[in-house]
Amino acid sequence: METLALKKEKVVEKEKPLSISGSEAVLKAFLAEGVETIFGYPGGAIMPIYDALFDYQDRLNHILVRHEQGAIHAAQGYARASGRPGVVFATSGPGATNLVTGLADAMIDSTAVVCITGQVYAHLLGTDAFQETDVINITTPVTKWNYQVTDATEIPSVLAKAFYIASSGRPGPVIIDITKNAQLQKFDYEGYKKCDHIRSYRPKPIVRKEYIEEAAELINSAERPFVIFGQGVILGKAELEFKKFLEKSGIPAAWTIMGMSAIPTDHPLGVGMLGMHGNYGPNVLTNDCDVLIAVGMRFDDRVTGRLDKYAKQAKVVHLDIDPSEIDKNVKTTVAVWGDCKETLPLLTELIEQKVYPQWLQRFNEYRQLEEETCIVPELHPEKEELTMGEVINVLNELTQGEALLVTDVGQHQMVTCRYAKYNQSKSNVTSGGLGTMGFALPAAIGAKFGAPARTVVAIIGDGGFQMTLQEMGTIMQSNVNVKIIILNNLFLGMVRQWQELFHERRYSFTDLSCPDFVQLAKAYSIEGQRINKRNEIKEALAAMLSHDGPYLLEVMVGKENNVFPMVPQGCSVSEIRLK
Ligand SMILES: Cc1ncc(C[n+]2csc(CCOP(=O)(O)OP(=O)(O)O)c2C)c(N)n1
């Protein structure tokens, strides 16, 4: 029989909080938040966290990258492919500063990323200690939130806030800088509570029905309405709501690069891509529509061209979750603040079922013109040299629109976005706002972890590939099944195109020598081949896709091919040139 004293002792034992280190608290937070994969690189100031991770390897998958920029781009790729936040570990000083480009990229492209950086001991802060940098001040403009932890007891609540802020409302990157003493410090752990509310932070504006009514009235009275949509539809997980809105309204719709794949590319109301290298019709007719309905997009200058000549004739309805986007670049007639997953169904209810055959026909006519002058010569060229477009065209044929494509920055990015076919959402991962060369290879690694069942193909230029090619080491070590296509024009192609068109062909430092990429891949145990003939494309792509493991295919394309159409910088969207 248990004595009362014994019973009491048991109760006391049960109630006694667990004493754990700050490092372990970080990992417990990750488990509670459903983190599966961390992309990271160790160093002195984050060693206690890595030491704790040693015992969590069965529950948390850590991918050792080759450069911290690779870690954050991989986390971005993971987030964009999965819809869940990507997670990064890096050490202090150079480890942390190597994250800055990725933070800026994630900030401008609204990508949820949580970064943990190690920091020097709290008592050394401000002394120019070894590998000390002022991470908070450096990253403030490029993060949605940042915070420095010097006391371990704060870790559970700070990490809960970090995940909440990164993924709620308009997503974005968060960095939590943890001093080494806080990582080592033991404290009484009282469990982890997820955060769902922070005073003075309102991730979703309250939906005002009167504005939805006003928007519906405008849409119902329009004769030539035009929908333009961005990544907000994907981030809001509102693809279905958007499709219903579109199909009831009957309005033609064009996507920004970031909005691509929110609806299938062959949707009957989809009229193509907006922007500098977008499709002809959507650009020209932006300046002819009478009501422009912008959904989850931010009127980036690459989309609007010259602002004082942008859609001046149109009434503008702007649906966005972030109030700071309203009236930032384009003056709106009606602003509908809110999460489009909530606002779109309300709007759909109030709009009339319509069709606009004549208006849609105008897009088709422009499409015909673009087919003859740009699309056919790119996809079915008569000249001997290969074009980037024909490679993408065959890739479409072989993948049937099911592949997830990750592009770098430059001509190949524009060509891929112009010609890729997608059947499902979250299929186009690219560095849209920042235009970060070197993004694609690590982002593709992350995308494969975020969407393991999908075929992930990175499409990269010879310039961008040379910026982060060390991540082939990550592919080798973690056996990541990504396919890499290098579209090699032996030039920094996009810059060369501008030099040709706007700087009288003065090719100032854009001619690029390359190593033997196929041999280099082999050194990393990655299979591959190089092709330069039209009749090799299909077989080579099929070999790449059917290969069981990572593969690098280098395609030698014409050196001085250009991407058209193009809205020259400083011109109006309706001044788009076909050649
Ligand atoms: C980090 C970085 N540096 C410079 C640039 C400017 N830039 C934009 S496109 C481009 C050329 C890209 O060349 P490549 O990777 O070979 O692709 P291509 O345009 O030939 O397809 C350059 C240098 C950039 N976007 N990012």
Image (tube, helix red, strand yellow):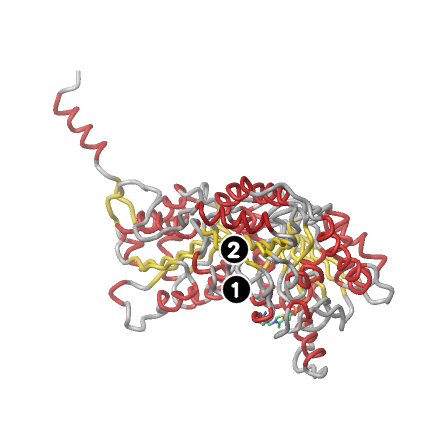
- Which image quadrant is residue 178 in? bottom left
The one nearer the camera, 501 or 251, is 251
Extreme residue in the front direction: 221
Give left or right: position of 459 versus 150: right
Extreme residue in the top direction: 1
Residue 463 screen position, x and y as percent: 65, 69
Q: Amino acid at mark 1?
A: Val
Q: What residue sits right under mark 1 in the picture?
A: 330
Ligand 1 found in image quarter: bottom right
Give left or right: position of 4 versus 254: left
Q: What residue sits right under mark 2 in the picture?
A: 318
Which SS class for mark 1?
loop
Badge 2: how crowded within 10 Å, few (<14), some, or many (20+)? many
Residue in view at x 56 percent, y 69 percent: 307
Look at the picture and state if 141 lies above or below 184: below
Give left or right: position of 414 versus 44: right
Which SS class for mark 2?
strand
**Nearest to N terminus: mark 1 or mark 2:** 2
Give left or right: position of 375 versus 141: right
Residue 518 seen in render: no
Q: Is mark 1 within 8 Å of ligand 1?
A: no
Badge 1: how crowded within 10 Å, few (<14), some, or many (20+)? some
- The disc placed on residue 415 is none
Residue 261 screen position, x and y as percent: 63, 50
Q: Amino acid at mark 2?
A: His
Residue 216 screen position, x and y as percent: 54, 47
The one nearer the camera, 83 or 243, is 243
Residue 541 screen position, x and y as percent: 76, 53
Question: Pointers 1 and 2 in contact (CB under 8 A)?
Answer: yes
Quarter that holds the C terminus: bottom right
